[in-house]
Amino acid sequence: MSSGRASTFSLALKKYLHPGSMSMTFRGHWRSYSSRIDLKKLRPMILQRIESRAKDYPVNGMIPVAEEILKARELLFQGVFTLLKIFPIVACKFCPEVYIGEKGHLIQTCHGYKRIGKNRVHEWVRGGLNDIIVPVEAFHLQNMFQGVIKHQQRFDFDRVPAIVELCVQAGADVTDDLLRSGSLTAEEASRGISDIESLSDDDIRMIANGTLKAWETLRSGVKKLLLVYSAKVCKHCSEVHIGPSGHRARLCGVFRYESWRGNHYWIKAKVDDLVPPKIVWRRRPRDPIVLLNEGRDYYGHAPAVVDLCSKAGAIVPSNGVPYLAGVSVSDIVLTPVRGGFPRVRASLFAIAEDRCSLGIQGYVGNKSAVFPLQLLGYDVDPINSVQFSNHTGYPTFKGQVLNGQELLDLIEGLEANNLLYYTHLLTGYIGSDSFLNSVLEVVDKLRSINPNLTYVCDPVMGDEGKLYVPEDLVSVYREKVVPVASMLTPNQFEAELLTKLRIGSETDGLKACNILHAAGPSKVVITSINIEGNLLLIGSHLKDKKQPPEQFKIAIPKIPAYFTGTGDLMTALLLGWSNKFPDNLDKAAELAVSSLQALLQRTLNDYTSAGFDSKSSSLEIRLIQSQDDIREPKLTFKAHKYT
């Protein structure tokens, strides 16, 4: 019986060792691959094919791209080096975590040396250039189709920056200084930069914009080259090889794959493998000064270079930059009042087309309204009627829509904890009649608790003859919302819908205000009326029903650009200033218009100085940079009263 088993094993062994097959041994385990092809005869054919293919490289059309990448790389190093002299960074002593700021955060994400720990507090030390721009090296080849580097040959080839090696293979002319290990030295990075201490704010902003542009040029250029030239990355570690096949140097240091004797498992490399984005926690204006571990699910993220440049005042592009994907943002915040103590607060039920991918910029809806109200002294509790990845001006968007019942559930939760005392209510874009009817229930509920509640309604329905909402919402606004509003801020098209009056002159605008007064609100501001090419704001304040209203106009200059979020911002400013000047709506409007125009002019100037064409796409307003214009605006626009 035993000899039969031995005979069977012997036959099987002879079969696997037949010359017509290939066999490999890994630590006592047999692997056999059946093949009738003689590789010795095939080898000359393969070499001939490689030699023929080599004649097609470098591709002439890619040489300018490679040279542009090297220039962008040098500018990137110089810009980051300069900004690090002004904006300090810290790095964890035991893990790769980096934070842009004087002091590190308290988020417990440190995993310790060689990942032996978990959820530890970081131990911060001073960071440097390589913490922002992670160096990635590769073997420097004599030519891209040379023989595979073997393990015993690993010291015969220099290690150079992977991007430089990619550009060399693409045909770019490089200096001997670039063909060496490591990144630019401090002296090289600071070349061309004079006294850093003497740089003005505009100079710093210009450097930040140039650095951000170089970062984007570098990444987009590498992406183009990878479509033509091969690059490999190890599946288990960060080793990169530029060439059609990976090397055989056994350098893989991931211990759980040590059964492979340190051999790399090569896969196709992507842009992030050659230009690591180095994602960092980003402190937003509404976040605490020191980020806490309890808020780790709500804080934002950004690539380190982008965060550094944005802190220096750079304008982050608004056209869906790919390396900003995955930013974690949450703008749904309900601030409790312990014991129900009444505070001067504005509760906002408005659309929030907040940028979760750009998390760095993009202001419409609540994001455009909440911050100005906070600067003007309000404690704001925003509720977003929608939560989108980006505002709807982009080609696509994803997210969730809050329905009417979910809104009422939130209100019930506040009421159950005696947190439903508010002095002001502000509503903006609402896309369905069911949600709008729920808002009306909220108005009744809030006024049952505070009869003096001020309800400011921005009836966002459309503009320039185009409806943004279903047509049946117009009648709901006209018949139900207008009668309960304290202040109404429509544009010209919305005022025409609400009054059924065609507005073609200033007299028509005043008539529209009177019709709306008769329906309910004591304050009406038609935020923009275009009359014969001139842009006007017309306001009306009915202080006493027995007396005619006080009416005024403000001439507004046209700015040759299109901005997003200005309507939400204007309504918020009118609310804030009209509460400070309750009997002088014209004064409140002067301050609101002055703030808005200063902010828009700053936005246009910043985009223009950064090289953007203001007429080609919409501009994201520079809200954070215009805090002084919101808090203490210079009165540059005067109201003219009608007699």
Image (spheres, grey):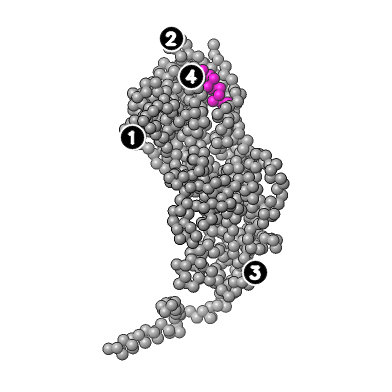
Front residue of 378/633: it is: 378
Task: Please tell me whether mark 4 sits on a helix, a strand or a loop.
Answer: loop
Near-viewer residue (521 or 575): 575
Q: How far apart are marks 3 and 2 (CA)?
A: 92 Å
Circle 1 SS class = helix
For marks 4 and 1 on the same chain, the one whose residue lies earlier in the sequence: 1
Per the model, the C-alpha gap separating discs 4 and 3 is: 78 Å
Q: Tell me which numbered mark, 3 or 1, is placed earlier along the sequence.
A: 3
Task: In the displayed orientation, state which residue is furthest to the top.
Answer: 546
Which residue, given by chain and number where applicable, does mark 4 sit on? 582
Query: Tag 3 or tag 4, which sits nearer the N-term?
Result: 3
Residue 344 appears in which quarter of the rendering?
top left
Camera sees residue 207: yes
Q: Name the residue under label 3.
A: 142
Residue stretch rendered in magenta on the structure:
584-595
Residue ID at (57%, 56%): 134
| Within-10-Å neighbours for mark 4: few <14, some 14–19, many 20+ | few
Q: Which mark is residue 413?
A: 1
Query: Residue 590 magenta-drawn?
Result: yes
* Left or right: where 212 falls relative to 387: right
Amino acid type, label 2: Lys
Residue in front for this viewpoint, 617 or 69? 69
| Label 3: which secondary element | loop
Give amino acid for label 3. Answer: Gln
How busy is the neighbourhood of tag 3: few (under 14 within 10 Å), some, or many (20 plus)?
few
First along the sequence among labels 2 and 4: 2
Q: Which residue is drawn at 62% across and 37% down?
A: 606
For marks 1 and 2, give the CA distance. Answer: 42 Å
Q: Are the residues flagged by discs 3 and 1 in contact, CB closer than 8 Å?
A: no
As drawn, 400 above or below 238: above
Q: Name the residue under label 2.
A: 546
